Each structure stands twice: as C-alpha cells, then as structure tokens.
Image (spheres, grey):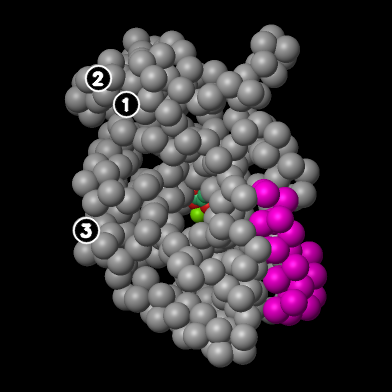
Amino acid sequence: EHKQLNRLRREPTRTLDGADIKLWANAESRDDVAEAHALGAAGVGLYRTEFLFLGTHELPDEDTQFRAYRDLILGLTGRTATIRTLDLGADKADDTGLALRNEENPALGLRGIRLSMSRREIFRTQLRAILRASGYGPLRVLLPMISGREEIRAARALMDEVANELRAEGQAIASHIPLGAMIEVPSAAIALTTFIREIDFLSVGTNDLVQYVLAADRNNEYLGDLYSPLHPALLHLLHDVLRTGARHDKPVAICGEMAGDPSFTPLLLALGLEEFSLHPGTLLEVRRAIRAVNLGELRTQARSLLRAGDRSGIERWMRANAP
Ligand code: PEP
Ligand code: MG
C-alpha cells in the first residue's frame, strides 16, 4: 500500500480521461517544502506567514522576513511560491502585542487583512520583504480575510507604492507579481464579480468559509457535525466561485483542509475544481483519487450533487461517485 502510493511520486496528476489537475502544497517548514518538491507539487499554494510572528516577543524585522521568503523561493527552484500576508487576530494571537487579545468575537474581529491595514507600517514591512524576495524566483501574494473590493484596492495600492519605493532604491524585484485573494468570508464569495477583474488568482479557504457560512465556530467541539463542508449552501457557493473564476479566466484553488481529504476529491472535481492546495502528507492520496476518476463523467454529475438537500444526500452522492 505504502509502496504503491510511493510509486505515484513520479506520476502526473491526471484523470482517466486525460485532464491535468494542479496540486499545490500548503507548506511553511523547510521539510514540508522539500517534501512538496519531491512529490512533484506545482509549487507552494499556501505559505502561512503567521509562524514568523508566533512564539516570539519581537516582531520579525524586514530582513528576517526577507530571508525566510527568499529561502522558500530558493527551495522551490523555479516553482511558484504563494506567500499569504499575515493572518493574525485574537483567534491566532501572537506574543508581540500585534494582535488584540480581548475581542468578544475574535473570528469576526480584527484579523487578517483588517489587522494588516490597521497597522500599515507593519504591513508595509512585510510587503517590502516579500517583494524583495520576488527577485529570486516566481512568487504570488495572497491576501487573507478579504471581504470585498475596497480591501483589494487598498492592498494593491500599498503593494504598488512599496514596489516603486524598492525600485527607486535600486532593488531587483519582479516586474509582475500576481496578487490573489483568499475566498473565506462569505461576502467575498457572494460579491466575487465586483472585484474578480482586479485580482490574478483566488484561493478558497474552506476552513473559514465553512465556519462563516454555517455560523459554526471551526474550533468548537460542542457543535458535532454542524461544522462540515457537506452542506448544500457550501457546495452551491463553491460551485459559483469556481464557475465565476473559470468565466473570468482566473485560476481558483482550494487551500482549506477539505482539499487534502481524498474522500472529497470526486465532489470537488465535480464542482469544477482544477487546483488543490494541500499538506504534502496527503498529496499522494489525493493524486491517487484524481487518477482513478473520469472528469467528464464527474462533471455531468454536478447537477445531481447540487440537488442534494442535506448532508445525507451529499454523502449518498459521494458513495455513488467514489472511485
Ligand atoms: C482556510 O481558512 O481554509 C485557510 C486555508 O486558512 P487558515 O486555516 O490559515 O485560516
Ligand atoms: Mg482562513
């Protein structure tokens, strides 16, 4: 079993009917990045920069951040790194005093892009470090907790400002740095057409999207099955986001935990997903699941999936369409 899975390290991520699916890695540690590379990942689809701010009492300065981002890029030898800007908040509080600690509803509070925008000098430092690293290989910037167009515009303006500043200083930075938005706040998913032309790619954070769509805390152990992606509302929303992305020719990945669970692979392919971003630990299992299905047939089953009225209906569909 292990040996058979290992044989897939060198195989393409291709469905039975010849469709190529992209597998990105969610990775921060050197080991995970090396593993992702060895498994033939397309690159890093989610690099959570929070870890640089956690477990320390001092904010990481520009050079410290720059070295971390540059090392990530060098480790990928030409494959793309997707660096997510800081997603701290009272739910993921640091010891540097940056994130608030006393919010009544931390998941609904000052986190992600909101915190970055309220502490612009810290955000600017991070953007400078990321942009400086862009001179070392392909890099994309991903913004967390985007709720709508204004945040995209504000972040884009700051990024342009920082890029001009660095060029004026004579730093070699990439001429084009793709900017993407996490789709994890329902308003961004629902109003996607209002800003999709202004971004280069999307990454759906189902961990948060599920929690916000269902009003179910992702860390609350008392909610039982309530916190689950197997709700018709979530599937409809994912389907809409994927269709809108395709219509506007913008790549859409899913980087939440559900992308790394092979039991969800046929369902996500049926809904139109072509890019998965997942921890290297389950990459081969998801590749195996992709190689076992016929994409054309699955897509024709999307309608019956979207007709399922509840979790058990969705699970029935999953059993009927398991490879
Ligand atoms: C998500 O919300 O699905 C996600 C990938 O981001 P995080 O788990 O870091 O919130
Ligand atoms: Mg998230």
Q: Residue 229 sits in which quadrant?
A: top left
Residue 46 belongs to magenta span? no
Q: Position of residue 1 (x, y in %)?
A: 69, 9
Q: Which amino acid does label 2 sit on?
A: Gln
Residue at image coords 70%, 63%:
70
Label placed on residue 270:
1
Q: Mark 3 points at which residue?
A: 193
Q: Is mark 2 on a helix, strand or loop?
A: loop
Q: Name the residue under label 2.
A: 301
The mark nearer the N terminus, 1 or 2, is: 1
Asked whether, in this view, residue 100 is left or right of residue 60, the answer is: left
Asked whether, in this view, residue 107 is left or right of residue 72, the answer is: left
What whole-number distance in Å separates the C-alpha atoms at marks 3 and 2? 26 Å
Asked if 130 appears above or below 248 in the picture, the reply is below
- Asked whether 204 or 110 is in front, the reply is 204
Q: Which amino acid does label 1 sit on?
A: Ala
Label 1, residues with CA under 10 Å away: few <14, some 14-19, many ≥20: many
| Any part of residue 122 in sight | no
Residue at image coords 50%, 45%:
255
Please provide the residue range marked out in magenta: 55-77
Task: Confirm or deny contact between disc 1 and disc 2 (CB under 8 A).
Answer: yes
Name the quarter where the C terminus is drawn: top left
Asked if 262 appears above or below 37 in the picture, the reply is above
Q: What residue type is labelled 3?
A: Thr
Q: Position of residue 157 (x, y in %)?
A: 40, 81
Q: Residue 33 sits in which quadrant?
A: top right
